[in-house]
């Protein structure tokens, strides 16, 4: 069996496992840590908005096991499932958003080749910048045998802790270039209506 097929089967296994977990039963624990990640510059935020195919706001609901090593000749990923709260860019959106994080060694990754648990806490509200790709690699070819997953491609600024100011900045950047999702206002109004 090829490495690609093994990677694909592992991803499918994790997705099936997530489907078996009742994510609504996860405790509503408080987030104890303040903003740990530095807020990127407006230039970096603009760059991330331009590179991303999907940007959404979500709460961490599940963090998968670390891959056991850093990306090298083969990419290494760690799965995070987010509760999708709103979509800023793109159209791919679901209540539970499984996202693969590339493990390279930036500020969101620790020395053990794993996402930092002090950042990826259950219920942490994040803004996620990702690309959509198939085969669990950066190949952009369509292949019906492999599903498409969002992948966080920047382990320094691919996820940023949410703040209203940061959200508003991203919305303004996306409005300027015409890529703000039409679903953004719909979800924003729905959230206001539920309060």
Image: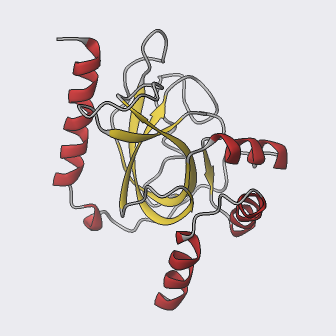
In this view of the protein, which residue sits in the foreground, 140 or 119? Answer: 140
Q: Position of residue 4 (x, y in %)?
A: 29, 18
Q: Position of residue 64 (x, y in %)?
A: 34, 39
Compared to 195, does 89 lie above or below? above
Q: Residue at x 27, y 32 (%)?
A: 146
Q: Residue at x 19, y 45 (%)?
A: 17
Q: Residue at x 73, y 61 (%)?
A: 166
Q: Position of residue 140 (x, y in %)?
A: 46, 29
Count of numbered circles in the view: 0
Compared to 9, does 125 lie above or below? below
Q: Position of residue 98 (x, y in %)?
A: 36, 48
Q: Is residue 85 left or right of residue 88?
A: left
Q: Is residue 111 left or right of residue 29?
A: right
| Type of colouring | secondary structure
Can you say which quadrant of the picture contains the N terminus?
top left
Q: Is residue 95 left or right of residue 12?
A: right
In this view of the protein, which residue sits in the foreground, 99 or 171? Answer: 171
Q: Residue at x 33, y 65 (%)?
A: 27
């Amino acid at each position: 069996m090829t490495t690609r097929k093994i990677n694909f089967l592992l991803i499918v296994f994790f997705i099936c496992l997530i489907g078996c977990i009742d994510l609504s039963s996860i405790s509503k624990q408080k987030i104890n840590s303040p903003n740990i990640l530095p807020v990127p510059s407006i230039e970096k935020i603009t760059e991330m908005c331009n590179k991303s195919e999907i940007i959404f706001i979500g709460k961490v609901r599940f963090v998968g096991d670390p891959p056991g090593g850093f990306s090298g000749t083969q990419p290494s990923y760690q799965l995070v499932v987010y509760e999708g709260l709103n979509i800023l860019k793109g159209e791919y959106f679901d209540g539970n958003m499984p996202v693969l994080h590339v493990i390279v060694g930036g500020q969101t990754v620790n020395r053990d080749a794993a996402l930092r648990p002090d950042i990826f806490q259950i219920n942490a509200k994040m803004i996620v910048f990702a690309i959509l790709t198939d085969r669990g690699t950066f190949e952009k070819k369509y292949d019906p045998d492999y599903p498409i997953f969002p992948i966080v491609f920047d382990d320094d600024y691919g996820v940023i802790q949410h703040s209203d100011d940061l959200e508003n900045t991203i919305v303004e950047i996306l409005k300027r270039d015409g890529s703000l999702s039409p679903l953004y206002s719909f979800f924003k109004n729905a959230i206001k209506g539920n309060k």
